[in-house]
Amino acid sequence: MLSLLIRSRSWLPLCLLTLVCALFSETARATEWIDYPDTGTATLTHYTLPDGYIASCGCTGASTQYPTAAMSQYAFGSSTAYGPSCGRCFKITLMDTYLPDPPFIPNVTKSVVIKVTDLCPAGGNGWCSATPGKPNQGGQYINFDLAWPSSSIPDDFFPSNKALYGFTDFGVWNVSYQSVDCLENWEGAKNAAALGSVDDGSSVCCPANPTGSANNTCPSFSDDNGIPPDTATTAATSAAGTSGASIPSLRDLPLLLYSLLVPALLLSGFLLD
């Protein structure tokens, strides 16, 4: 049977074509991000960001003195470093809480305008795990992870009812969001030191006021470098990081395909006949 397949000379190109299609299919899946509207609803969590810390986008350390947030990976648009959402500003308004039963609905309206400076990874089933085909556990495709506590946001920004619930930090909120002009609405726009990217020679991109134009909006770092989205848990990511393996860049793909194509065609006789 094997000798018959070799003599037929037709199976190798077919197999190679199947392999090429599979490679391009994986690449296509790796670059599918969430295309979110300028207004909508999302979930909101919070995390601690040290003062002066240079987060994924590479925004200046002074930006941490003003309201900032991380954005869930598939809305952020990259699995590492910077993405198209870097530098964008959003007005976020609290609606109600997600976890308590019954939900807490505040009797005051609390809003804050944030600048996206960081990436919230999609690992596991966390609040930042939404993909284009599957929302997070709150039914939303976007999660903003607010840098809070923060000197720029009041300590009582999140309303509560300790007498009813027994605690004051609800952890997760349902919010509405609206994309806004950073220079007109973000508090940090008044301080030139809080705008733009750090200049340290690293992979950074933090526009002062991105509008969606290619001239002032970041590309996807992981797309440009052929890095697929990492949806592993933190433990799995840590274990994988010690293996020493590296992911080839998309720019290496033509050479890889050529190195496979020529030997296969030679062996099948296509280049000899």
Image: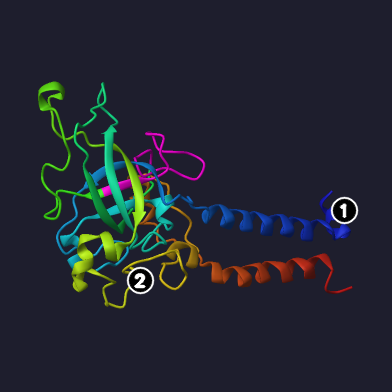
Residue at the (26%, 21%) spot, across then down: 102
Q: Residues within 10 Å of mark 2 (few under 14, many from 20)?
A: some
Q: Which residue is mark 2?
A: 203
Q: Which residue is mark 1?
A: 4
**Prevailing secondary structure class for the magenta stretch in the rendered image:** loop
Q: Residues within 10 Å of mark 1 (few under 14, many from 20)?
A: few
Counting from the top left corner in percent of width and height, residue 5 is at: 84, 54
Is disc 1 in contact with disc 2, using a CB cutoff of under 8 Å?
no
The answer to if 8 sits in the magenta stretch is no
- Near-viewer residue (140 or 259): 140
Quarter of the image where one finds residue 242:
bottom left
Counting from the top left corner in percent of width and height, residue 262 is at: 73, 71
Q: Is residue 227 left or right of residue 201?
A: right
Quarter of the image where one finds residue 179:
bottom left
Where are the magenta residues, as a range?
Answer: 124-145
Q: What element does badge 1 sit on?
A: helix
- Near-viewer residue (60 or 264): 60
Q: Amino acid at mark 2?
A: Ser
The answer to if 130 sits in the magenta stretch is yes
Counting from the top left corner in percent of width and height, residue 97 is at: 26, 32
Name the image quarter holding the C terminus: bottom right
Q: Is residue 14 left or right of residue 113?
A: right
Q: Is residue 124 above or below residue 189?
A: above
Q: Amino acid at mark 1?
A: Leu
Residue 61 visible, this orientation: no
Q: Is residue 205 left or right of residue 200?
A: right
Q: Is residue 90 above or below residue 41?
A: below
- Point out which mark residue 43 bears: none
